Amino acid sequence: MGEQSPEKLLTPVLSASWDQEDSWTLDNYRAHGGYRALPKALAMPPDEVIAYVKDSGLRGRGGAGFPTGMKWQFIPQGDGKPHYLVVNADESEPGTCKDIPLLYASPHALIEGIVIACHAIRSHHAFVYLRGEVVPVLRRLQAAVAEAYRAGYLGKGALGAGGDLDITVHAGAGAYICGEETALLDSLEGRRGQPRLRPPFPAVAGLYACPTVVNNVESIASVPAIIDRGKEWFRSMGSEKSPGFTLYSLSGHVARPGQYEAPLGITLRELLDLSGGMRPGHRLKFWTPGGSSTPMFTDEHLDVPLDYEGVGAAGSMLGTKALQCFDETTCVVRAVTRWTEFYAHESCGKCTPCREGTYWLVQLLRDIEAGKGLLSDIDKLADIADNINGKSFCALGDGAASPIFSSLKYFREEYEQHITQRGCPFDPARSTAWADDDSSAHLEVNA
Amino acid sequence: MSDVNLGMPPLPAPAYPEEVRARLEKDAAEVIARYPDSRSALLPLLHLVQSEEGYVTRTGMQFCADVLGLTTAEVTAVATFYSMYRRKPSGDYQVGVCTNTLCAVLGGDAIYAALQEHLGVGNGETTEDGKVTLEHIECNAACDYAPVVMINWEFFDNQTIESAKRLVDDLRAGRKVIPTRGAPLCDFKQTARILAGFPDERPGATAAGGSAGPASLAGLRLAKGEADPVVPPRSAGTRAEEA
């Protein structure tokens, strides 16, 4: 165990009432302080709400870390056009699994945040773009929105003097690219989900070419707690540039996978120490700090502070805080091949570097994994990844290049081994969740 | 094999029977009213026509084009972009095994291979009884419950080869199957209707499955000093059948 107890290191805020019976209901949300921030926010002039959220230092939890209040501030006011808030609930980045449990257990946190945000940006219509493949979450979101209408938090006069507010829950239809904000907007307009050229940015010409804020679920759901408990309280957690709490999603070969809400800047070592480490008898080999699109780390990076600056300085990105941990039984070539197949499958086809590049990466990687590659293929992989990275229309291309670059940086010998030994040296059966079920040879936990 | 038809262009799609058309038009009007611009209703309307016939037929696409004032080419372009729209008749239950990296490594590949053999079908194929369509799927945002199987987009967490085989056997035998998180399974058409934005009317459907799964509570339990010091077994599969 580390020096500090879990009680001190973890800070459940969004997840604080998830263990209550019927946690998703309005009654339960209100019983735990829900909708207490809303009247406070509605009593503030919209610009003050924006300034308050900006001062709190809240940064986008969807991956990019852009300051939420600043995004709201970019919305032109008095322009005579409708303004829209679009919540990105298209959580699809491999490894990312925070917004879905949040919406399943506590959809009203999002709804309250939406009302506050719409007051701030003077919007009368918000959309929640939820990926379609999560029907249990859709049910609860639909039910929660209906409850909020009945309770008067939505509908006629919901914004007080600010007027009415409607929320439309919109189910997607299966496309990773729609998590990219401009592709999401095209999809929400009833088109193929393909990213748009920027500028103009959504704040100027977003949904229906009107000023639009696109925010991640967790970002918006964090707003009520900030208003209710104060920006100073929020800033008392995390660092100067990355203040506050956030959901870390621990998955893979760990003893206790799950959601861990903690101040920004906690390390993977601390999270593993408090949660029981890697599965017994195994050690960490590689991990992602924020989904498959963020360059992977190794056990050298256990003490990197998991905030925007810390992870950036170590050569990756905080992303969605999806901590996918793989142990020594995992073949890195297999892992990267599978991720690359994902990017090739999900590439929307709009731009050439990504569409063609991901296709060719898959061909090379499959050959290498199967022991049919050449040593020169390794440089070719790096070259193709370099032709995708920074040269694609949207971040999907950069994401596809990340696992290639980072795995070559840390595990180049493993690629070479596949080629020189004409096959994969790993046994996939040893990586499964049930691989050690019959084993009595449990060694020390070694994170 | 290619799906591309190089023969004569097909004749215009047959229309829905009058009664079906009238009913769907009423639903479509409700969907369209949710949006400032009618075209935004296209994705939900494609879910709606899928709920009618179990897949997106040419008739369904023609219907969407008619009610939205679009061409069938515009509708087809959208319908073929998104993976949740089926383009051929499929089973009552869509069994999707996550084979993205994390689930694959933790057993998803083994589960998927075992199900292919057990059912005698390949990717996107349906068992002869028309019950089960098997697919491998991408990351479904439940990595802390890996390996994950989705049936009609309900969560079946922490699966094993045995539990997944049992699931498909139960589905084919018509036994009641209950997800680890979510409501008792309805068939694919009913699921598509929920996706179109028409709430599940079954009593208790929203509440089914409890507030949160165990992994979602892992951090909260530790923070409250409630967690077991020992590692919980990763057994699971489905919840025990409710009486």
Image (tube, coloured by chain):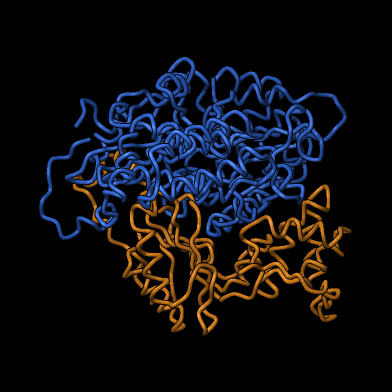
Q: Is residue B6 above or below residue A197?
A: below
- A285 on left or right of B155: left
**Horizontal and vertical percent position of residue A366:** 44, 50
In-front residue for pair B240/B111: B111
Q: Quick one: quadrant of the N terminus of chain B?
A: bottom right
Residue at (56% x, 74% y) in the render: B187
Chain with orange colouring = B
Quadrant in the picture for residue A297:
top left
Asked if B225 appears above or below B15 in the picture, the reply is: above
* Lateral position of residue A26 relative to residue A233, left or right: right
**Residue ID at (34%, 44%):** A419
Query: Residue A259 appears at what percent x and percent y?
Result: 39, 42
**Quarter residue A206 falls in:** top right
B210 above or below A384? below
- A212 and B57: which is toward the camera: B57
Residue B235: which quarter of the image? bottom left
Q: Which residue is painted at 76% across and 31% down in the image?
A: A122
In the image, taking residue A422 as reference, residue A120 lies left or right, namely right
Q: Chain A, which colour?
A: blue
- Residue ID at (38%, 59%): B109
The correct choice, above or below, for A228 with respect to A170 in the image is above
| Relative image position of residue A260 (x, y in whole percent) | 37, 38
Residue nearer the viewer, A295 or A254:
A295
Would residue A106 be seen by someone viewing this image from the given angle?
Answer: no
In the visual, does A432 lie left or right of A1? right
Residue A178 % position (x, y) = 64, 45
Q: How many marks?
A: 0
* Quadrant position of the C terminus of chain B in the picture: bottom left
Q: Residue furthest top?
A: A240
Query: Residue B198: in sight, yes or no?
Result: yes
